[in-house]
Image: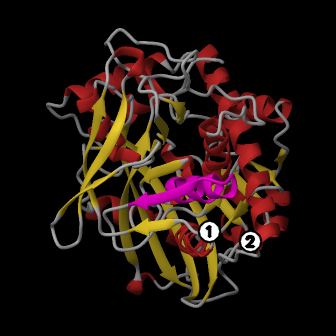
């Protein structure tokens, strides 16, 4: 089939790679000049199956109340006259029950484990390099209540096959000596040896190069303006996609199937079709610092759960550098950098690893992560026969990219993916109270 993939980020590029590997003729369309230039550009760098507890959990409402009015809050809602934001927030609260949290963790872990294995196989098959580190991920807690709250989710992850091991402060410092400075503050930690880290932007560009060499066409600097349908009812399908190219000229591109992988912009393109995707942009921040003192800089990828920050280290053509990313700000499609939030990240880095990074040469970035209220992405066939969704991955786009792309390619090809996950499909679409709203339900 001729498959048109909309979006050349991590999700769109992995989808294209796996679709091409199954024999499809694939074209990728993206408004940026190069693959991976938006949300995949400067994220936290973790392939983190162990980061499976969703934002919506039983403890979240109380934390949100405590963070009200704080400009540097890890999770910040800037309330707007935006019905989509309010509806998303209500759905978020509905997902904070223990039962829904357990279900969502199950979905996130299953897809994450499958995806990590797919990444490892892809690395073996292609030899792709992206400054990867296979040293595991260490979650540390400097708040005893936060650590206690992580025990039950950790037990559930372990039962699902995620080897997230509980460790004490001494073991945490043994695994990552750079934490010695805050040894007395660590209330507890967990370690997942099989998790990884790496430069997501470099991976996306390298995989796009590999895919292009096998025949995938990348149409960069092409702005998608609309999807046009034909037919009605069950026979309704996408006829073509309308784009404007780099010169501003109108083009009409046709295929047999279409994959919507445009992250936070997916619901804007889907809405005129009558599809209401439960996705809202969660602005995340990152800081990249050149390493100042290698002896003080961490080697293992870390997660600071209390401050909702992740830490990765890259060593490559751009030098030895630290990437710190996280927090979530719900403020529509605004990407402006808030200096208060940027400074809060740098301040936390200095508290934990004083002298490790050159804060005077800090590079700040923000990206819009496509968040669903449950943190479970939307993958599968939409109610429009030849339109497939691969979007809504939130903070776990890098973690879930390869598994999502491989599963999506199977679904487009009429095959059942080899992972137990709540994929969308003709028999798995469940209308919410608002007609046309798409949400996952068990197949």
Q: Is residue 85 visible?
A: no
Residue 53 horizontal side relative to residue 138, left or right: left
Q: Please tell me which residue lies in front, 370 or 324.
A: 370
Screen quadrant of the C terminus: top right
Image position of 60 with respect to 323: above or below? above
Query: Mark 1 and 2 residues: CB-CB less than 8 Å, in contact?
Result: yes
User: Picture coordinates of residue 203 (x, y %)?
Assistant: 60, 70
The residue beneath circle 1 is: 312
Q: Image quadrant of residue 33?
A: bottom left
Indicate the secondary structure of the residue bearing disc 2.
Answer: loop
Residue at left offset 41%, top offset 47% = 263
Left or right of 29, for residue 12: right
Q: What kind of element bears circle 1?
A: strand
Q: Is 318 one of the magenta-colored residues?
A: no
Residue at 60% across, 76% down: 213
Provide residue 420's location: percent of width, then percent of height. Answer: 75, 29
The reply to whether residue 164 is in sight is yes
Rendered location of residue 236, percent (x, y)? 36, 24
């Amino acid at each position: 089939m001729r498959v048109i993939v909309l979006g050349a980020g991590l999700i769109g590029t992995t989808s294209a790679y796996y679709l091409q590997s199954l024999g499809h003729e694939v074209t990728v369309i993206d408004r940026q000049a190069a693959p991976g230039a938006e949300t995949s550009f400067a994220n936290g760098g973790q392939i983190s199956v162990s980061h499976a507890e969703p934002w919506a959990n039983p403890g979240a409402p109380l934390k949100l109340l405590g963070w009200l009015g704080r400009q540097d809050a890890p999770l910040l809602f800037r309330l707007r006259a935006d019905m989509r934001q309010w509806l998303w927030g209500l759905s978020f609260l509905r997902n904070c029950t223990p039962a829904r949290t357990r279900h969502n963790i199950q979905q996130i872990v299953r897809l994450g484990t499958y995806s990590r294995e797919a990444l490892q196989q892809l690395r073996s098959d292609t030899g792709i390099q992206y400054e990867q580190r296979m040293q595991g991920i260490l979650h540390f807690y400097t708040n005893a209540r936060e650590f206690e709250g992580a025990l039950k989710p950790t037990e559930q992850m372990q039962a699902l096959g995620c080897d997230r091991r509980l460790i004490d402060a001494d073991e945490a410092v043994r695994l990552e000596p750079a934490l010695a400075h805050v040894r007395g503050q660590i209330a507890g930690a967990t370690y997942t040896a099989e998790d990884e880290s790496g430069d997501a932007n470099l991976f996306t560009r390298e995989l796009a190069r590999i895919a292009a060499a096998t025949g995938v066409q990348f149409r960069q600097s092409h702005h998608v303006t609309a999807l046009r349908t034909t037919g009605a009812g069950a026979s309704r399908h996408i006829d073509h996609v309308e784009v404007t190219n780099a010169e501003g000229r109108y083009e009409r591109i046709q295929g047999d199937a279409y994959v919507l992988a445009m992250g936070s912009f997916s619901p804007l393109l889907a809405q005129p079709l009558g599809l209401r995707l439960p996705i809202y942009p969660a602005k995340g921040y990152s800081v990249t610092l050149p390493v100042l003192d290698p002896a003080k800089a961490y080697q293992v990828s870390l997660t600071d759960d209390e401050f909702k920050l992740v830490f990765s280290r890259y060593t490559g053509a751009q030098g030895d550098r630290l990437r710190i990313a996280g927090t979530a700000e719900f403020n529509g499609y605004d990407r402006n950098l808030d200096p208060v939030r940027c400074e809060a990240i740098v301040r936390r880095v200095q508290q934990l690893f004083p002298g490790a990074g050159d804060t005077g040469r800090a590079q700040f970035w923000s990206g819009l992560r496509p968040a669903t209220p449950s943190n479970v992405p939307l993958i599968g066939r939409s109610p429009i026969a030849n339109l497939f969704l691969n979007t809504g991955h939130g903070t776990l786009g890098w973690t879930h990219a390869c598994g999502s792309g491989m599963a999506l390619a199977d679904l487009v090809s009429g095959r059942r993916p080899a992972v137990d996950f709540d994929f969308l499909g003709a028999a798995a679409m469940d209308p919410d109270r608002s007609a046309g709203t798409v949400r996952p339900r068990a197949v």
